[in-house]
Structures are given as C-alpha cells and as structure tokens.
Image (spheres, rainbow, N blue to C red):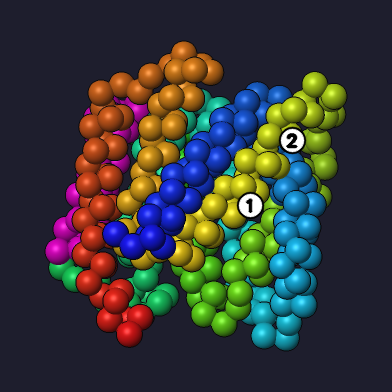
Amino acid sequence: MTAGTLRGIVAMLAACACFACMDALLKALAGHFPPLQVTALRGLTSLPLVCLYVLWRREAGALFSRRLRWGLHLLRGVLTIVMLVLFTTGLKTLGLAEAYTLTFVAPLVITMLSVPLLGERVRPRHWVAIAAGFGGVLVALRPSQAALVSTGALAILAAAAAYALANVLGRLASRTEPSVTLVFWTTVSLALAGLLALPQWAPVRPEHAPMLAGLAVSGFLGQLAITEAFRHGQAAAIAPFEYSALAWGIALDWLVWRAVPDGWTLAGAAVIVASGLYLVRREAPRQPAAAA
C-alpha cells in the first residue's frame, strides 16, 4: 500500500465520521424545523466556511469562468436540494443505520447511470451484482407489506437515486472544471433553498446555535476530507471504506437515541455492501490503464 493510498483511506474514514455527525444533527434538527428549512440551514451555515476556503486556495476566479457548464450546475443544485429534503424526511422516522443501509444503493445506481450518461460499459457480471444489491434493499426493507410502503424508507431510496444522478452530473462537470466549483455552487444551491422555505420558516432560537455550528463544521470538514481522500489515493482502494459510515450510524443511534438496527437491516446491509465492494474491486484493474 502506497503512502498516498494510506493517507486517502484515513481521510475517507475521517470524512465518514464527519458526515455521520452531520447526519445526526440533521436528524435532531428535523424535530424542530421542516425538512426544506433544514436543507437551507445546511447551506447557509456552511457557505461562509466554503467562501473562506475558496479565498484561501485563491480559486475565486474559477467560480465565474466562462468554461462553467451552468446547466449542469443548475440541475445538480436542484437534485442536491431534493436529495437532502428527502433524506431529512426519512431521518424523521428511520434511524441512521437504517437510512445508511438504504443509501448504500447509490453506487449501484451510479453504475447503472454511467451507461447512458457517461458512455461507460457495464459487464454482465456487474449487472448481476447490481441485481443482488437491490435484493439486499428488499431484505433491509423487511419482507412485509407495511415495511415496503414505509414513507421514510421510500424517501431515503429516492434521496439515494437523486444523489446518484447528482454524482454522475458532477463527474461530467469535473472533466472540464476544478472541484472547487462543484463544492461552491452546490453549497450556494442549498443556501438558496431558504427562499423556498420562507412560507413555512420556523424561528431559529439561541438554543439551536450549537447544533447549527456543528452542522456547519462537520459538513465542511467532511467535504474537505472526502476531497483529500480521492486526491491522494486510488479510488478503488479508498471507496470501500465509505461503508464505515454504517458503523458510525449504529454507534450514534445507540449513543443518542438508544436504538439498534434489527437483523433484517443488518442482513440487507451485508448484501448491499458486498455488491458495492464487488463493483469497486472489479473497477480496480481498469483504473491504472486509464491513468497510463
């Protein structure tokens, strides 16, 4: 293992920890504010830190370059807002571990979307892994009619689909633009969601300040860490450690809400993670050749 890959793995583990803390705060805030307002607060609290980061890196000029693909940024911003609103809605009724289990379907959806949108080839055995992953989703949803129509579960699955499409659009934009433009304009989009939330805006009281500060810091540090992870190491070696989020979800569920996932959730998570790991590892031999 190279030093760069080891550094990338550590950064990915740190990113998952930060995002898990952020999601726990989203779940807590969902008990006080509407999901659309929580989404806006996520953007509004992080935007000052993102602006300082852009200025520190001296990349402000890239944010308004003529090369920017504004259509992609607009669509990606809308999808990110939809994703976070749906994810926050799901967290109102599901635990973090249950939500993470369902969001792990996103890499499978990204692989599917890479065919029509990125022109990539998906081999037959990859389609088998994708089908197995969706089977794991059915297991996690529990094989009962009541669970299959759970509003929270369906919201999380829809959020995963929106995240996957936004991720693919981000790959398209990153072919011609630096990553700082994606981070900045995505954060701006979340902040602008506040305009849509105004009709149902609930007062933000002083006792909410610690949660909002934690939301800003954890989201910002998580974004920096995940960017650092893929900058220094091989993606195929680093991506599997994203599944460490499930461990953080289980720990936070127990520490904060004294809840633990049931056997169906863990069994479904095992199938989904195994499918995702297979897809990631099968990509590994193609990446060195592409780099060369």
Sort mark 1 into few (<14), some (14-19) or many (20+) by Cα contacts within 10 Å: many
Q: Is residue 5 above or below residue 155?
A: below
Residue at 83% x, 29% y: name it. Answer: 204
Specify whether 178 is left or right of 249.
Answer: right
Q: What element does badge 2 sit on?
A: helix
| SS for callout 1 | helix
Name the spot of residue 159 as percent of width and height, x first: 49, 47
* Magenta stretch encompasses residue 3: no
Question: Does 96 sit left or right of 243 as displayed?
Answer: right
Crowdedness near tag 2: few (<14), some (14–19) or many (≥20) residues, C-alpha within 10 Å: some
Write the residue at 60% across / 78% down: 177
- Residue 190: give x, y in percent of width and height: 70, 52
Image location of residue 113, percent across then percent down: 38, 67
Residue type marked 1: Ile
Front one among 161 and 6: 6
Which residue corresponds to mark 2? 213
Query: Which residue is the site of mark 1?
Result: 81
Q: Nearer the viewer, residue 229 or 88?
A: 229
Tell me if I can see residue 32 in this picture.
Answer: yes
Residue 64, numbered circle: none
Q: Magenta includes 139?
A: yes
Magenta span dominant secondary structure: helix
Q: What's the residue at 32%, 33% (across, down)?
A: 141
Q: Quadrant of residue 285?
A: bottom left
The magenta-colored residue range is 125-147
**Residue at 68% from the left image edge and 34% from the top image edge:** 214
Q: Is residue 189 visible?
A: no
